[in-house]
Image (cartoon, rainbow, N blue to C red):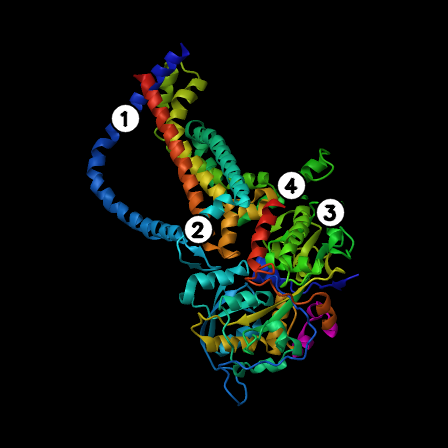
Amino acid sequence: MGHRMRTGVSRREFLRRSGLTMITIGATPAILAACGDDGETGTGGSPTATSGGTPQAPDASGTINFLSWEGYDIPVDSMNAWKKDHDIEVNPTYIGNHDDIQAKIKAGGDAAGYDLITYYQGYMPLYTELEILTPLDENKLPNLEGMFEFWASDINNFWINSEGQRIGVPWTWGSIGLTYNSAEVDEMSSWYDLLDPSLDGKIATVDDPAGNFNLACKILDLPSHQVPKDRLGDIEDLLSQFVRASRGVSPSFGDMTSKLVSGDAVACFHGWAAMNTFAADQGLDTVETNIPDEGSHSFCDAYAIPPTTQNPDAALAWINESISAEVNAEAAEYLVGGVTVEGAVDLLNEATAGLYPYEDLEGLLELAPLAINAPTQSDEYVTFPDWLETWQTIKASA
Amino acid sequence: MADDQGERLALATTTAAAERGIGGRAGGRERGRGLALVAAVPAVLWMVAFFVVPLGVFAFYSLLTNAFYDVAFPLTTDAYVSAVTSPLNRTLAWNSASVGLTTGAITVAVGLPVAYWLRFVAGRSRVAVLFLITSSMFASYLVRIYAWRTILGSRGVVNSVLDRVGLIDEPLGFLLYSRFAVVLALVHIFLPYVVLVLYAAMAPLGRGLLEAGEDLGAGSSLLWRRVILPIMAAPAVSAFVFVFILSAADYVTPQFLGGRDGLTLGVQIQSNFITVGNWPLAAATSILMLLAFLLLFLLLNALLRFRRLHDLRIQT
């Protein structure tokens, strides 16, 4: 049987304070892939990196125009104190869908003025093509030293591009799983168990095209970024079955949780361990999440600085602080997520520390690797626009 | 005989209404015309800046080439071709039309008698009832949508009551995540607006008109058919169009209550803009939707005009 992820009831204030019920979609965070460290690692230098000297965070102040999920602006005590000490003010624009980020930046142009965004690793190829990610000066990010080796590495160029330039700093992550109400159904060892006729109309799906396609690829044992065009139909067929078995696609993970709590659903395709806690916060403490035998995928969100920034030093200082052990741990508790800083694990409360097996991250990431989204253009492989357009069809006509 | 009676009744009531209207407005209209033009300038400027110009930009974008979260030259009608030939768009357009037509028809059909009751029957309780009708507008749109989920869900109020009285063994699945749920929620959301519009439109329909009709021997059915409905036709059509457009174009309610058969074209337009990054297709679909709404409006307007001419022919 697959890996089981449990969360105790910890951050009861999570929903109340962050409204992350709307965390959705593309929130899906992301994916940890071939987690096995290939040893190439290395944090390639950025073109703006200062040579030599001890890395030091910029002594910046002012306003940071933030564009990402509510809660990703880390409204926790340790970060609030740092902001106050450095006279930093955050002006947030919250998104309802990961795609809001590229939509707002591309539609707004330079006038958009955003200083800080997040992206989950699957979006790296798209954001690279759209020129949304700028190189980060590692000499201004001294806290990179404290990260787990895997998260600091250049694995799949998620955070360090092929030219060796750092383009993102991963700071929170999690794994996608099969989330179910254990009071209603038994633990399921296969994603296909969700298609049992007895569950018809009782499962929930989420409007996260990238996440769903990555998961479908994993179930079908296809490399998500290199799916031959003639296999798109197989993915469409599979996802259609899950959507048909549900009664409509939820706009968010929070909405899927609501369906579990209200009894309108008993299990979720493309669930998330954090939903255990979300449901407990709403009075249902029997929600659990496991990773079925076919596996799943993981996600990791990274901070990045778009070309629209007006205050890059303040954004860099923020990013550096987000990967201090104390802030990283407090943020993980707040967001019910994983930490990327080694020293943060010991600072986690029991529930958050038990969320993911830090002692066997490799095992988890082998079962639920960080996926790569399809390429934006290809004559040979299914493309990212193919995913998106196919998903629209599935939603409406499954 | 009945027709003669109806014609005389219509002539009498229409003449009375016209005389009162002319008498009451003639002087004021001349004096206020200049002032009205000046007063309209801010609204006109506002509409030009924030509706006409953006609409022009939209139309321009719809003719550009898709460049994935961007647009490029050359100008092309590809987006329109895609929008029209897409089977998915046709399915969603039908869903939108179905939701809009049903919601519009129900709100007007329910709202008209309520407005009549408020105007002629409610008496002292009018203010209290008006307050109750409008009070649902105090709650936010999303709260009302979630309230319907609580009412219609598997363990919701309706299913629980039906289960308790032994009418069902299993929850009724069609209540939620269906087109039915979308229409129900939209009717709830728009009904107060329709009642207010129709109630206001009934102001010129004085009790004297109805009494004149009754004096001429009309029963309630004939009064409705030959006096009330002809006078209320235009505002009722306005209310219908208002609800139809907002319902058919809504993309929030369908996502929360709609299920698979409740998705609308509005959801697809939003997805094309934000998720798919095909701006020309989204703009073209929007423009086509706007044209469809405009066509409906013109058709209904023509119908009203035809009806009016028909009535005048009868009277003369």
* SS under mark 4: helix
- Up-down relation of residue A22 to residue B259 (above or below): below
Residue placed at 26% from the left, 48% from the top?
Answer: B41
Residue B241 image offset from top left, x and y in percent: 43, 37
In front of the other: label 3 or label 2? 2
Residue occupying the far bottom of the picture = A53
Residue placed at 41% from the left, 41% from the top?
Answer: B291
* SS under mark 2: helix
In front of the other: label 3 or label 1? 3
What residue does disc 1 label?
B20
- Up-down relation of residue B224 to residue B164 (above or below): above
Q: What residue type is labelled 4?
A: Val
Q: In which quarter of the image is residue B171?
A: top right
Q: In which quarter of the image is residue B112?
A: top left
Crowdedness near tag 3: few (<14), some (14–19) or many (≥20) residues, C-alpha within 10 Å: some
Q: What residue type is labelled 1?
A: Arg
* SS under mark 3: helix
